[in-house]
Image (cartoon, rainbow, N blue to C red):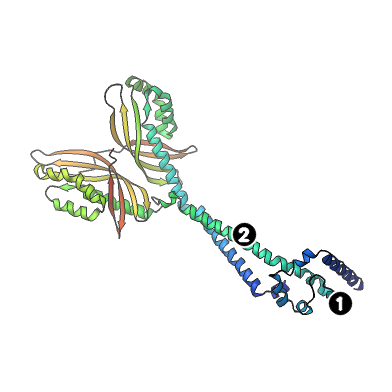
Amino acid sequence: MARVSMTTTPLRAAALALTVAAAVAAGWGGWSRYDAAHDASAAYAQARNDALAAGEQAVQNMNTLDHARLDQGLDSWEDSTTGDLHKQLVDGRDAFVEQIEAAKTVSTAKVLSGAVTELDDRAGKAGVMVALRVTVTAPEGEPAVKESRMLGQLTRTSGGWKLSALGQAPVGNTAG
Amino acid sequence: MSTTRHLVNRRRRLATVAATAAPPRTIATPRPAPEPLTEAGDETEASTGTEPGTEPEPEGEPAHDDPPRRRLPRLRIRLPAVLCAATLLLGAFAAWSFTSAGALRDEPSRQNTALTDIGRTSEVKGQITEAVGAVFSYDYASPGKSDLAARKHLTGKAVQQHKDMLAEVRAQAPKQKLVLTTAVTESGVEFLDGDRARLLVFADQSNTRTGKEEETTYAAAMFAVDAVRRGDTWRIAAIDTFTR
């Protein structure tokens, strides 16, 4: 070993320095990549995006219903929800079916914009606000278009983020 | 001792024969790169000046010097080769890891620091909430206040948008003695990247006519605003009312 280091020449020293430099770069790069992949705020950002995507889709589902395809629509409502909201939908399903079959309405919804207002990644809770345009078409008359300000609470389940509460933002009691 | 030496010498002789018998391998030894190393690094071998292939001289040397001398040429080939390979591998890994780390950091979800940057998120929320309340409120008794608010909180495209939106209110305000008040009820940051942000705003508007009979109507509003940070303050740069 001593002999090997004794035989170090400028060229060999340069080669060794180059290797060391490459090792340092590799170490730094490895650390940098690890850091990028395990960034806590990145995981949080991902949870935010997931919650928003699931929330927007769920809110849209909950405002979409075709009387001709009621079962499909109501299944999607139940798929989009969890907890008390889910229970309410299941309990009230039969009565609702009668109501919609009588009215023969078709509702479609379009998400205009959405934002996550709060996110507790660890507890698996999030709040979303969604600007929605809902079009309700009855058998007679012009389709009614209204804009909806939806506020939803999301809970993370094994099947992803689902709505645990949903309502319209109240109006009229804060201004003035 | 003599037996050991005898054995070693015999092995050495065999090795020499093997070395001469297979020239391609031994010729590989004095390649351009390792050659200068040999000369400067090993005085004995350089001074003897013998062909590396034949090497008859070590036989006369003491046996204890033999093993390291025999291993040395192999090390000389290996070390630069190993260094070269290691440099290439480490360099390749470094290049991959930096590229990959950069790609990860550039992911759109990370560019958006809404909620992940708690300070900035609440800062832009607070300032835009205040700005929206100020620019969308109008009192017929003090129209100057609204102009002042517009100058303070609006920039770019939003200036004209705001002017158009309030044109009707301005026209009717003196006659009907209008007082328009806007209060943000909910706001959420959709996107935040440095000095740019987009927020979704739910607001309540109360419109009070204090003319003959006092009458107040409420309206629900929802819109998105693009915000830019100038210095320490966030300003509204564009208003999106989701018109079809």
What residue do we see at 31% from left, 54% from top? Answer: B228
Q: Are marks 1 and 2 on the same chain?
A: yes
- Residue B139 picture location, percent across and down: 15, 48
Instruction: Identify the element where label 2 is drawn.
Output: helix
Q: Residue furthest left?
A: B212
Using the image, name the chain to which the residue with label 2 belongs.
B
Position of B55 relative to B140 (above/below)? below
Q: Which residue is mark 1?
A: B60
Residue for badge 2? B89
**Image location of residue B123, percent across then percent down:** 32, 54
Which quadrant of the figure has residue A7?
bottom right
Identify whether A30 is placed above or below A85. below
| Residue A109 lies in quadrant | top left
Toward the viewer: A123 or B193? B193
Earlier in the chain: of badge 1 and badge 2, it is 1
How far apart marks 1 and 2 lie (CA) works out to: 43 Å
Number of labelled discs?
A: 2
B78 sits left or right of A88 in the view: right
Q: What residue type is disc 2 on?
A: Leu
User: Tag 1: Cα neighbours inside 10 Å, few (<14), some, or many (≥20)?
Assistant: few
Q: Which kind of residue does numbered mark 1 sit on?
A: Gly
In the rendered structure, the residue with mark 1 lies on which chain? B
